[in-house]
Image (cartoon, rainbow, N blue to C red):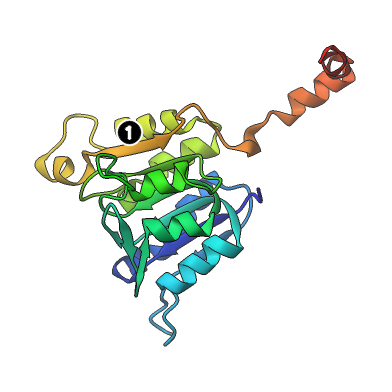
Amino acid sequence: MPRTGLAYTDDPWLYTAQWRATVLGMAVDGPVTNVWNDPATEADETTAADYTWRLANESYEHALVSTHSSSQAHSMNGTVSNGDLEDLDPQVLFYNLYACSAAKYTDFGYMAGEYVFGDGVGLVAVGSAKTGGMMSNLMDEYFAPLGQGATFGQAMLDWWNTGVDPDGHIDSERAWLYGMTLVGDPLLLTQRYIPEPATLALVAAGLVGLILRRR
């Protein structure tokens, strides 16, 4: 997979679009495609048709999707349903879904499950099982650990322990942030953190060849 990211931010959060692309870049070794509706232009950049085209024709390591949603569909000037995902075969490995109820795993065909367990290549999707999501001002506490080699599970723990109030949770935090869910394998980490210097050292010592011969 290309080491790239997709930050897809629909209209209600357009003024945080640049920040969302920036924090996503903390976990991506390559460029981040930032799709949002710039008020200075007349074009509607974030639409269901555009998003489904990208899922069908482009490949990304990470995608941060910010849109209104239910457990069964995203809404972005049109609808992207769980059935659409079944047909698209999305080529994205890791998702962060700022999309209410997208990870509501008690509903059949929930969106996060379609991203991970459907016909695409998805391995991990983070989202809320109810109204809520990973607030933009706290996202760096999740993406930065990924960028430093943490597993997805550890990044979630770091986000919770550091980003969310570590001294106790006020009612607004409970209302919005409780219900965050990781769908997939929390022990995965991104491919960019394979320790290349250590591998080169093994080659120099002749150990890599020995390992390959034994296989």
Which residue of the protein is positioned furthest toward the bottom in this rendering? 42
Q: Nearer the viewer, residue 21 or 9?
A: 9
Specify whether residue 33 is in view: no
Q: Nearer the viewer, residue 130 or 132?
A: 130
Percent of width and height locating residue 3: 64, 49
Q: Which residue is labeled 1 in the image?
A: 162
Percent of width and height locating residue 188: 52, 30
Specify whether residue 30 is in view: yes
Percent of width and height locating residue 58: 60, 61
Q: Quadrant of residue 104?
A: top left
Give the side of residue 182 with respect to residue 198, left or right.
Answer: left
Tally the numbered discs. Answer: 1
Give the side of residue 170 with respect to residue 103, left or right.
Answer: left
Q: Residue at x 46, y 51 (%)?
A: 23
Q: Is residue 77 above or below residue 98?
A: below
Q: Secondary structure at mark 1?
A: helix
Category of crowding for the residue at label 1, using alpha-carbon neighbours closer than 10 angstroms: few (below 14), some (14–19), many (at least 20):
some
Q: Residue at x 15, y 40 (%)?
A: 174
